Amino acid sequence: MSNRTLGFVIAAIVFALDQLSKWVVVYGLDLPNRGEIVILPIFKFLWVNNAGVSLGLFTAKNSLEGFALAGATGLIALFVLVWLWREANRKDVFGLGLILGGAIGNILDRIRTGIENLPIDKPGHVVDFANLHFGDFSPFLVFNIADAAITIGVLILLLRALMSRDTPKADANA
């Protein structure tokens, strides 16, 4: 399987798992009305409408800002797509596929929920639901599969960049 194909397959799997999990928590488990469902003593599904990006930054306040945020995220996804298309390193392709699939999943959420909220001037949001916690301490914000894939993909790229630094070659003329 070529690197490109592998990257696109990974992106498609992440996207499908993300959308399926969001459908299950929204419609199958009715999480928006239930609010939370305890799965384990340290893990629960908790309903969150995230109108911002990672860590709740750049929270959109209206439909226009929501669609602008989706557009900006789309440009980043396009950059990742081009990078994936050109990337020769299989490990980087894996990370880029995770990022691309997660980004597309969250973009679709933001656009779909933004359209559902029209003409009301509310921004679209990303469905976040996974909450890992230890008592009152939550080491992560509430997240979804797309968020986890993006985070893991970025970590793979960062680790690869740090671990595969070129060592300076000895000067042959010295």
Image: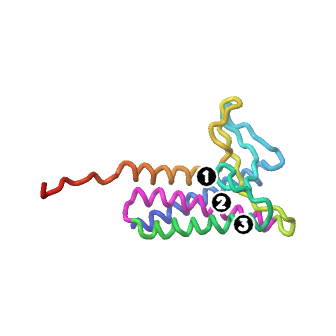
Q: Is residue 104 magenta?
A: yes
Question: How far is mark 1 from mark 3, CA to CA?
Answer: 16 Å
Q: Residue furthest left?
A: 173
Quadrant containing the C terminus is bottom left
Say if residue 159 shows up in the picture. Answer: yes
Q: Residue furthest right?
A: 120
Q: Is residue 71 above or below residue 126?
A: below
Please tell me the numbered disc located at residue 111: 3
Q: Earlier in the sequence, mark 3 or mark 2?
A: 2
Q: Earlier in the sequence, mark 1 or mark 3?
A: 3
Q: Is residue 143 above or below residue 17?
A: above
* Residue depicted at x 83% and y 68%: 118
Judging depth in this view, the residue of 120 and 2 nearest the camera is 120
Q: Are marks 1 and 2 in contact (CB under 8 Å)?
A: yes
The residue identified by callout 1 is 147
Apparent side of residue 38 relative to residue 91 in the rendered image (left or right) = right
